[in-house]
Image (cartoon, rainbow, N blue to C red):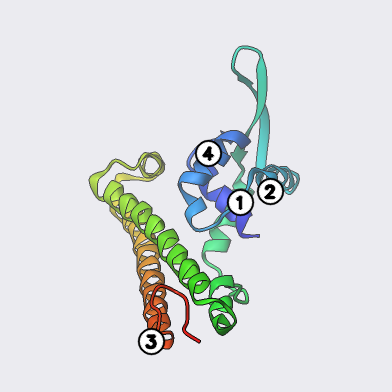
Amino acid sequence: MSLRYALLALLNVEPMTGYDLYKQFESSVGYVWHAPDSQIYPELRRMERDGLLEGEEVAWGTKGRKRQYHVTDAGREAFRTWVNTQLDYPRERDPMHLKAAYLEWADPDAARSQLLAHAEHYGARLLQWQQKIQEIDGGTSDMLNRRLATFPSADHSRVAAFKRFTYEGLTARAESEIAWAQRGLALLDELYPEDSSGTAAT
């Protein structure tokens, strides 16, 4: 159900088509809740059916038409209720940490390759999230500026602070995962000292 509230978060800024939402999703809430367009469009239809959104056909290009969605009062109330409700934490699903528990089955070079890939993945995410913080601090975040336009000026610092807080948490998580992968690489060197290139001596 978190997809529903991620969409409401975006639509509380301004009306959007499904295509607009998909693009915004990738550059904003997509950092904390991934969803492909194959999930977004059906959820929009369900939200309209449930009275959280209203849709209308709008012109698209020279001849096309697309459905644009507006948040209803019921949708805003549902979003506010969700924000104020204690989170029900899901059970963990972490494939890399699961695999790490059984790396004794892996060839050392394969284990090294996977840990390096893990560090590279989070290194790229770290750069993305640090850039988001820089945009917030510099006032150049397009989505944040559009969101601020929907709030009284007295609330702007609070809105920006919570967005920064979120990316601070993501950067800390990325730094932790990178450090963990580096520790894993060091552990492989300790456990297979005969050949640090990845092939254990027999």
Image coords of residue 118 (percent x, y):
46, 65
Q: Earlier in the sequence, mark 1 or mark 3?
A: 1
Say whether marks 2 and 1 touch (CB < 8 Å).
yes
- Badge nearest the viewer, 3 or 4: 3
Tell me the amino acid under the disc marked 2: Gln
Q: Position of residue 15 (x, y in %)?
A: 55, 35
Q: Under tag 1, what secondary structure?
A: loop
Q: Nearer the viewer, residue 180 or 135?
A: 180
Disc 2 element: helix
Residue type pointed to by label 1: Ala
Q: Which residue is mark 2?
A: 39
Residue marked by disc 4: 23
Query: 143 or 108, which lies in front?
Result: 108
Residue visible at 37% across and 52% down? 128
Query: Can you see residue 15?
Result: yes
Q: Which residue is mark 3?
A: 190
**Distance from label 3 to label 2 (Cα)?**
45 Å
